[in-house]
Image (cartoon, rainbow, N blue to C red):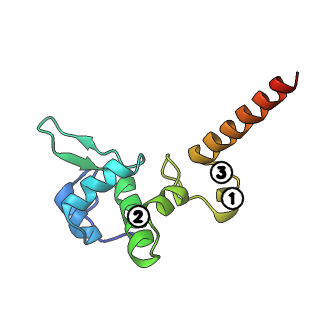
């Protein structure tokens, strides 16, 4: 999924947007949605992406546009550290919403037990 980019330490948002074939506003939106996309900023506030971040952006683009994943689907597919999660590993991951529901159910059952005592 790599693209032809010059070999350097950092890439500006315009270069990354062009390589990913998306608008810069899309990249800024993805930064707000995906915790693994946090580019450094220069002293003037310019976003500076590493080669690893560019590769992650290309993975996100592929999942969203070619594989037709939703934003939530991509979040489940790529870990917070930016690692691709295999389907069997994904099945073992419990989301925050699942944990919250389990805790509510447990709390309710414990109250019922307390009332019986």
User: Percent position (x, y) of residue 37?
Assistant: 37, 49
Give the vertical position of 80 relative to 25 (above or below). above
Mark earlier in primary sequence (3, 2): 2
What SS does tag 3 mark? Answer: loop
What SS does tag 2 mark? Answer: helix
Marking on residue 91: 1
User: Percent position (x, y) of residue 68?
Assistant: 44, 75
| Local crowd size for mark 1, using a 10 Å CA cut-off: few (<14), some (14–19), many (≥20) | few
Give the vertical position of 108 relative to 22 (above or below). above
Considering depth in this image, is 54 or 77 the residue closer to the camera? 77
Considering the image in quadrants, where does the N terminus appear? bottom left
In the picture of the structure, the residue carrying the numbered disc 3 is 93
Considering depth in this image, is 41 or 71 the residue closer to the camera? 71
Marking on residue 60: 2
Most extreme residue toward the right is 117
Give the mark toward the camera: 3 or 2.
3
């Amino acid at each position: 999924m790599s693209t032809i980019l010059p070999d350097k330490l950092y890439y500006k948002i315009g270069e990354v947007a062009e390589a990913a074939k998306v608008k810069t506003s899309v990249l800024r939106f993805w930064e707000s949605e995906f915790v693994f996309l946090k580019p450094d900023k220069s002293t003037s506030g310019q976003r500076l992406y590493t080669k690893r971040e560019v590769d992650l952006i290309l993975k996100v683009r592929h999942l969203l546009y070619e594989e037709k994943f939703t934003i939530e689907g991509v979040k489940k597919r790529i870990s917070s550290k930016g690692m691709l999660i295999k389907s069997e590993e994904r099945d073992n991951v419990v989301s925050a919403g699942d944990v919250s529901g389990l805790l509510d159910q447990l709390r309710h059952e414990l109250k019922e037990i307390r009332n019986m005592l």
